[in-house]
Image: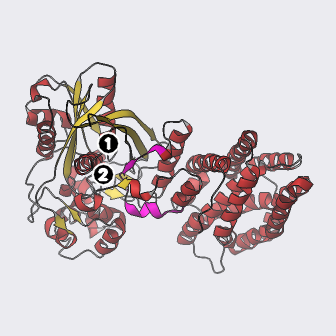
């Protein structure tokens, strides 16, 4: 049974915000402009992004509503009636509610009935987990279709007021880093067990991922204060105490970050050895990577080893749409397919590394459909 | 660096070597002392012990390299020359380790008098065995791992150590040293790979040796905590 991505959609809240406007939306921590902003933005290269908050840090649209909007955008472009959706598979790093699961809230926002529900919780690769679950469901003929939605609303975590709660205003680099990396948005894919009657479909050939969580400490996190080794946010006497200790800040351990390249490439080489990837047969690469990693030595080595894919085949919309965490790959795929005249038989290789605790997901697609 | 073009078997070999290196790099995160080093939790005693243990392997390093050289017959005279020049370059590296050890507060007689740990014994044994066989082209695999480790030490470990400690005299000369001449070493290694990856069997042998050497290096570092 073949599984096809027959439609895609996205939702980006508000207008595109440029680098100079970011601090208007997120606010100035203790009224001071950030000294790190310029350097981090220069290295990640992002020029525009979207936020679900206004300049008073008031949430304008919920995470589940963004997800529903992306899903509707996807369905509007398809041949499937919403009442016929059999499975809903959702992903996010943090829903509006801690409980129930994000999928339940999105289903309610979409008002679709009796679907088989799945929620993936994680960071960037959680959307690929949600996609694989949906793919497997359709592949083994348990469901005829599945709607997969990934959405992120991280900007709420970056409000200046959150940082000002922390005792002694102890905001280190790792706690500020992601403020300049992540933004809001949602993407959706519709899977079906046959190609769409007109236009292009993307056949999912395979999805594989390799997690190295046992080899590394966590690299991106919410839930533990800076110099804490055991206590996590629920272990404090109150949320306020946890917040004061800095346990609720979104942190990135930048020192560990380089390891993501090693694990990403290691998995890629594994797939080549398994015969799943033939680099000279890949037409397009969609990779959720920030550009600076391309320059690393290991890419030179890959090239010498005949295992690299030329830069002109790589597509990204990271710099214009922002890094929207798990939604990124769907938003990328959506814009790619809508802006490129792909031909039947062309192949697309997708790669989603997650620095959370070093997981990397890979996917191989082939363009199908009538010319 | 100029883009090197390898033969297709050479490329296949390099792909596999890259994978072996990355597997090793990832596995190293399980080695207790490496974890402590990379996470900034190394004690001074830890660093001294690390240097002390490394020295016992490094002082033997030129033995397997020169043994390798003499095991190449006339058909590999060009490789013999390359290997000999490596031996010449590296046979005194252990002195850097001794100097670092003293700069880090250790006693010279201690590092000079210490024995190899269990992992070093195994590593040395394997290397000398393979180096003694005729035309041991598989040792390119060993060189690959060692080159990678040297690079890791220079680009990562020496920085971490100098962030944690401040020594009156430079105590990371050994680690830093391996960062120099990096580009040239790599280009040379690629040429060697092309030269010897001339059959599937050769490629398999090179990969096998790389895997074993990586595993034994890991053991050598794990054993530092047991000494």
Residue A283 placed where, x, y %? 40, 47
Q: Nearer the viewer, mark 2 or mark 1?
A: 1
Can you see residue A101? no
Whichever of callouts 2 and 1 sits on the residue coming sooner in the sequence is 2
Where B215 falls versus A6 (above or below)? below
Q: Which residue is mark 2?
A: A222
Can you see residue B137? yes
Check residue A167 for magenta coloring. Answer: no
Where B200 falls versus A32 (above or below)? above
Q: Quadrant of residue A88?
A: top left
What is the secondary structure assignment of the residue under circle 1?
A: loop
Tag on residue A343? Answer: 1
Q: Which residues are magenta?
A: A281-297
Give the Cα separation between the discs numbered 2 and 1: 43 Å
Residue A18 placed where, x, y %? 19, 68
The chain to which mark 2 is attached is: A
Residue A314 placed where, x, y %? 38, 54
- Residue drawn at x 45%, y 53% as measured from the top left: A260
Q: Which image quarter holds the N terminus of chain A? A: top left
**Drawn side of residue A114 relative to residue A207, left or right:** left
Q: Which image quarter holds the C terminus of chain A? A: top left
């Amino acid at each position: 049974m073949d599984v096809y991505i027959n439609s895609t959609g996205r939702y980006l809240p508000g207008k595109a915000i440029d680098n100079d406007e970011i601090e208007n939306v997120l606010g100035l921590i203790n009224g001071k402009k950030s000294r790190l902003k310029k350097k981090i933005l220069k290295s990640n290269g992002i020029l525009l992004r979207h936020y679900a908050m206004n300049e008073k840090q008031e949430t304008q649209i919920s995470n589940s509503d963004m997800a529903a909007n992306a899903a509707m955008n996807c369905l509007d472009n398809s041949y499937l009636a919403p009442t016929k959706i059999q499975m809903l598979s959702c992903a996010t790093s943090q829903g509006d509610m801690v409980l129930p699961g994000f999928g339940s809230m999105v289903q309610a926002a979409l008002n679709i009935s009796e679907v088989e529900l799945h929620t993936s919780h994680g960071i960037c690769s959680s959307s690929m987990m949600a996609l694989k679950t949906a793919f497997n469901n359709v592949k083994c003929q348990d469901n005829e279709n599945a709607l997969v939605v990934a959405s992120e609303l991280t900007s709420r975590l970056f409000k200046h007021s959150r940082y000002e709660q922390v005792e002694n205003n102890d905001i280190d680099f790792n706690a500020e880093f992601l403020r300049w990396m992540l933004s809001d948005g949602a993407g959706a894919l519709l899977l079906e067990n046959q190609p769409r009657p007109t236009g292009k479909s993307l056949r999912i050939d395979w999805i594989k991922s390799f997690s190295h969580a046992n080899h590394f400490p966590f690299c991106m996190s919410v839930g533990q204060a800076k110099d804490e080794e055991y206590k996590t946010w629920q272990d404090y006497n109150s949320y306020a105490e946890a917040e004061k200790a800095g346990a609720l800040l979104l942190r990135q351990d930048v020192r560990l970050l380089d390891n993501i390249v090693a694990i990403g490439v290691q998995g890629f080489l594994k797939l080549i050895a398994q015969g799943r990837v033939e680099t000279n047969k890949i037409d397009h690469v969609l990779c959720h990577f920030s550009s600076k990693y391309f320059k690393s030595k290991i890419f030179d080595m890959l090239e010498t080893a005949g295992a690299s894919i030329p830069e002109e085949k790589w597509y990204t919309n990271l710099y214009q749409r922002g890094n929207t965490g798990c939604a990124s790959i769907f938003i990328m795929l959506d814009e790619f397919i809508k802006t490129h005249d792909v031909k039947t038989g062309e192949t697309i290789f997708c790669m989603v590394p997650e620095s959370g605790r070093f997981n990397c997901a890979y996917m191989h697609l082939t363009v199908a459909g009538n010319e | 660096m100029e883009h090197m073009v390898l033969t297709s078997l050479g490329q296949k070999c390099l792909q596999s070597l890259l994978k072996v290196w990355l597997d090793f790099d990832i596995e190293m995160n399980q080695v207790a002392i490496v974890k402590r080093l990379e996470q900034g939790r190394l004690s001074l005693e830890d660093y001294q012990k690390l240097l002390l243990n490394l020295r016992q392997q490094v002082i033997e390093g030129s033995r397997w390299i020169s043994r390798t050289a003499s095991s190449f017959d006339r058909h590999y005279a060009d490789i013999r020359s390359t290997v000999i020049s490596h031996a010449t370059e590296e046979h005194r590296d252990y002195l850097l380790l001794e100097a670092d050890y003293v700069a880090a507060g250790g006693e010279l007689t201690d590092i000079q008098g210490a024995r190899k740990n269990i992992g070093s014994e195994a590593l040395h044994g394997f290397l000398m065995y393979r180096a003694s066989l005729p035309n041991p082209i598989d040792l390119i695999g060993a060189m690959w791992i060692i080159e990678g480790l040297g690079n890791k030490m220079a680009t990562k470990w020496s920085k971490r150590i100098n962030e944690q400690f401040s020594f009156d005299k430079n105590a990371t000369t050994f680690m830093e040293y391996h960062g120099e001449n990096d580009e040239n070493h790599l280009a040379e290694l690629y040429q060697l790979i092309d030269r010897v990856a001339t059959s599937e069997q050769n490629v398999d042998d090179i990969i096998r040796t790389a895997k074993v050497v990586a595993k034994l290096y890991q053991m050598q570092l794990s054993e530092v905590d047991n000494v």
